[in-house]
Amino acid sequence: MAENLPSFSPCDALVAVMVGVSASDQNLRTAELVAIERAVNHTPVFANYDIDRIRAVSQTVMTLFEEEDGLDALFGLVRSALPEQLFDTAYLLACDVAASDGRLGEIETAMLAEIRDQLEIDRLHSAAIELAARARHRVL
């Protein structure tokens, strides 16, 4: 399986993390897809990113999720493509996507914990990122 995997650019890896958290509960909600598109359109790190790549990256993530060791393969791709200084950016984007639909289920929470662990996000930093995402997506 691993030899057939595409290589990701750093921005592809960020998109893959967002798609991964959205798809983790087997339900890609419209609000989450809109949050991914909004992030790609408005986050400076994506300034030169080809938005048409989102579909191919999403398909790769979905294919990996069907494999037995797909999550490990996904994180392998992400870690190899993503510079360390973007690890917290990836976690922030994942938290934003997870919080965007106003629901954070057990599976999404577990996926965020896995992202946090895989990217070695400091617990204090992750708590601040999570709080900011919740505050940003709060409704009246």
Image (spheres, rainbow, N blue to C red):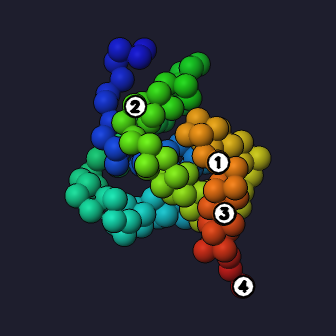
Label 2, label 3: how many angstroms apart (C-alpha)?
A: 26 Å
Identify the residue position indicated by label 2 in the image: 80
Ranked by sequence position, the earlier of labels 4 and 3 is 3
The residue mark sitting in front, 4 or 1, is 1
Which quarter shows the C terminus? bottom right
Q: Residue type at mark 3?
A: Ala
Q: From the viewer's perspective, is 118 left or right of 85?
A: right
Q: Looking at the image, which residue sits at the far bottom?
A: 140
Q: Residue at x 32, y 58 (%)?
A: 46
Pointers 4 and 1 in contact (C-beta within 8 Å): no
In the image, residue 63 above or below residue 132: above
Label 4: which secondary element? loop
Identify the residue position indicated by label 1 in the image: 122
* Residue 106, percent from left and from top: 77, 47
Identify the residue position indicated by label 3 in the image: 128
Relative depth, front residue between 45 and 6: 45
Q: Residues within 10 Å of mark 4 (few under 14, many from 20)?
A: few
Q: Residue type at mark 2?
A: Ser
Relative depth, front residue between 112 and 101: 112
Q: Residue type at mark 1?
A: Asp
Label 3: which secondary element? helix
Ranked by sequence position, the earlier of labels 4 and 1 is 1
In the image, residue 16 above or below residue 99: above
The residue mark sitting in front, 2 or 4, is 2
Identify the residue position indicated by label 4 in the image: 140
Q: Residue type at mark 4?
A: Leu
